Amino acid sequence: MSNSVNICSIVEDVKKALEEFRFRKSDNTSALILKVDREKQEIIIDEIVEDITIEDLQETLPSHQPRYVVLSYKRNHDDGRISFPLCFIFYTPRDSHAELQMMYAGSKMSIQREFQLTRAYEVRELEELTEEWLLGKLGN
């Protein structure tokens, strides 16, 4: 038996958008927000946001519905370097509908594998999603 259930398919538009998002030329923090279309059981694009702060991202996400966030984070290092780590954030609020939580959880691993997103983090409450939290996850 497989260790993950692939409940939702990834539509071609999402595959193309993720590929473009990964290789785009940008000098700021950006987010590709994905959601599940319950009826079609597909992962679709919710929103693409350029030049966003982590606090603005918090306000963009719905408080009672899960989302997948692919975040290209502009990180200023102490030695003057700038990097753009690509992070996969699985946001699943505790009080969201159980069926939705299962659909999102069942599809999470297939997205990570399909797009080779190795920096994967989970957030249960929007208040947890802060710059300090992200920097702590990214380490030195």
Image (cartoon, grey):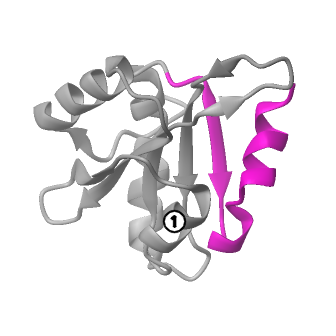
State the image coordinates of residue 67 (x, y, percent, origin top left): 43, 59
Q: Nearer the viewer, residue 6 or 35?
A: 35
- Left or right side of 118 for 69: left
Q: Nearer the viewer, residue 61 or 98?
A: 61
State the image coordinates of residue 79 (x, y, percent, origin top left): 85, 17
Queried whether the magenta region covers residue 49, the answer comes back as no
Residue at horizontal 28 percent and vertical 21 percent from the top: 19
Residue at horizontal 46 percent and vertical 29 percent from the top: 27
Using the image, determine if residue 63 lies above or below residue 41: below
User: What element does badge 1 sit on?
Assistant: helix
What amino acid is found at the position of numbered circle 1 in the picture? Asp
Residue at horizontal 27 percent and vertical 46 percent from the top: 8
Q: Quadrant of residue 37?
A: bottom left
Q: Quadrant of residue 54?
A: bottom right
State the image coordinates of residue 43 (x, y, percent, origin top left): 25, 48
Residue labelled with disc 1 = 56
Residue at horizontal 65 percent and vertical 21 percent from the top: 82
Queried whether the magenta region covers residue 128, the answer comes back as yes
